[in-house]
Amino acid sequence: MDNHIPEACIVLFGATGDLAHRKLYPALFQLYQKEKLNEKFAVIGVGRKDFSHEKFREDVIASVAKTGDFPSEKVDTFASHFYFIPMDVTNEKSYHQLKELADELDSTYSLNGNRMYYLAMAPQFFGTIPTFLKSEGLTETSGWQRLVIEKPFGHDLASATELNEQLQRSFPEESIYRIDHYLGKEMVQNIQVIRFGNAIFESIWNNKYISSVQITSSETLGVEDRASYYEKSGAILDMLQNHMLQMAMMVAMEPPGGLDPKLIRDEKVKVLRALRFYNEDEVAKNIIRGQYKEGSMNGKTVPAYVDEENVDPASKTDTFVAARIFIDNFRWAGVPFYLRTGKRMATKATEIVVQFKNGPMALYHEHNDHYQPNLLRIHIQPDEGLSLSLNAKPQGDFPALLPINMNYCNNCQNELNTPEAYEKLMHDCLQGNSTYFTRWDEVALSWEFIDGITNAWKNKDIPLFKYSSGTMGPLEAEELLNEDGYTWWPPTNVRNEINQ
Ligand code: BG6
């Protein structure tokens, strides 16, 4: 892939919103200061507020300043590329003004008509904006046109299909960049390199040697001020349908024939095609849903989900989900993948644990309390790295065992400068590299799988287990693994001790 970043106009819808301030402006600035952004660039912020260009630039400068202490001259020059248009995105006439400004900046900065439209907006506008961009002639330039779209991409297969059909009337699939920000995380991208760049792993990466895989993404925060969205999504649509399944695909995919985005995405989608879909009884057995109760976090009492602002006191929304899934193909037949995610849990951490089978002869592990199965842990966040746990002999008293860990820390190597997910994803999109964006067939299959679960939850009396805030979720999520002879790593009692 060519590393050249072409000149471009970035049209950002939702320019005064939270995502733009917290993530997108700092990410663009990082690209700028690392000289990964072409000097010829302009950003048009679109929002409802009546901002002048000047006021918008002050806003951008303030959001960049929150992320570090940067030379003010550099930040000012960066912000001078920003322009603002107040508009109602549902009114097609307002797009004429946008077109005028985009055309003008195109010639001021010699942008060759290249445009990236970023929709950091509420999902009800995802269909409207691209339709008007096309009908009002914004996409008719001599350069490339790319559409970046945030989640949620629909709320089930039917709504996602409808949205997709609407988008594709204005932008072809290869120009649509659906964001899953987990795919922009350093260590999620590193899974591919660890697997396919090391013969020692790839040769044992299958059901002959691996007994199970766990993926946990736990959060300490509660619903915060997002109840109106979260009440309808719950953990299953918010995290499992996208981030968790994406990580599972990265762990389970076959080696691609090359590094072309299409080849990689082809292999990822095959994992979803092999996913075992559950009937309603199987959902009850394999998927555990939970909701946080009041509890203690860092010495403070935090409210139950149902007592949070704007949450229905009788809400049945899941704030936790644990799933046992199976990928029925040659490589993974019989290997459970356990996925677990939730809010108000004991720690904020994302980790993948690959558990290997014990050796064929119980020379050391039988009756030895110190024996630990070999685990390869991929730490996604907050620490980034790898660790491999092995058993060794301690000095002296043979035959006791000593579990040891070999650690690699990724963010220690790169110091504090690991690029944020959004920085990498914007860079990739500007380069036209769609590897770490989700393709429609992946999205459709993941919805089909998730719809099976949510429909069962609607139709059958499947319990919603309560868990205390500050724990690792309901006991039933532990039992899901215990019944197969496994435990979540690190075992919950260890995790609780760590957090006391
Ligand atoms: C978002 C979800 O997609 O991911 C949020 O909507 C969640 O609810 C967030 O908090 C977690 O992302 P990260 O990068 O903080 O793990």
Image (cartoon, grey):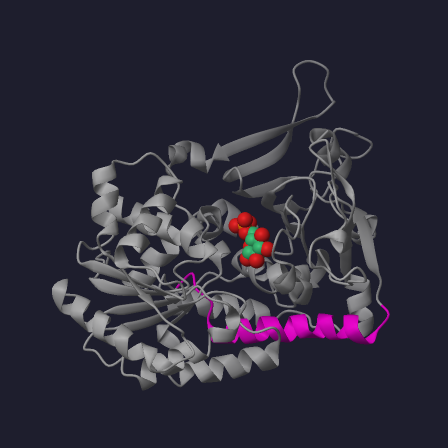
Q: Residue 145 in magenta?
A: no
Residue 321 percent across, percent down from the top left: 71, 57
- Work out whether residue 459 or residue 378 is closer to the camera in this orientation and state it: 459
As displayed, is residue 159 above or below residue 214? Answer: below
Q: Is residue 42 left or right of residue 383?
A: left
| Nearer to me, 245 or 325 | 245
Residue at left offset 45%, top offset 52%: 189
- Locate residue 293 relative to residue 155 in the image: left or right: right
**In which quadrant will I find the N terminus?**
bottom left
Q: Quadrant of the C terminus?
A: top right
**Residue 439 covered by magenta stretch:** yes
Q: Which residues are magenta?
A: 435-461
Q: Measured along the vertical axis of the image, is residue 409 above or below residue 179?
A: above
Prevailing secondary structure class for the magenta stretch in the rendered image: helix
Residue 175 image offset from top left, x and y in percent: 35, 74
Residue 333 visible somewhere in the drawing: no
For the question of whether residue 318 can be seen, the reply is yes
The image position of residue 380, as x and y in percent, is 53, 45
What residue appears at the point 31 percent right and 53 percent down from the top-left corner?
Answer: 55
Residue 306: percent from the left, percent from the top? 77, 55
Residue placed furthest toward the front = 50
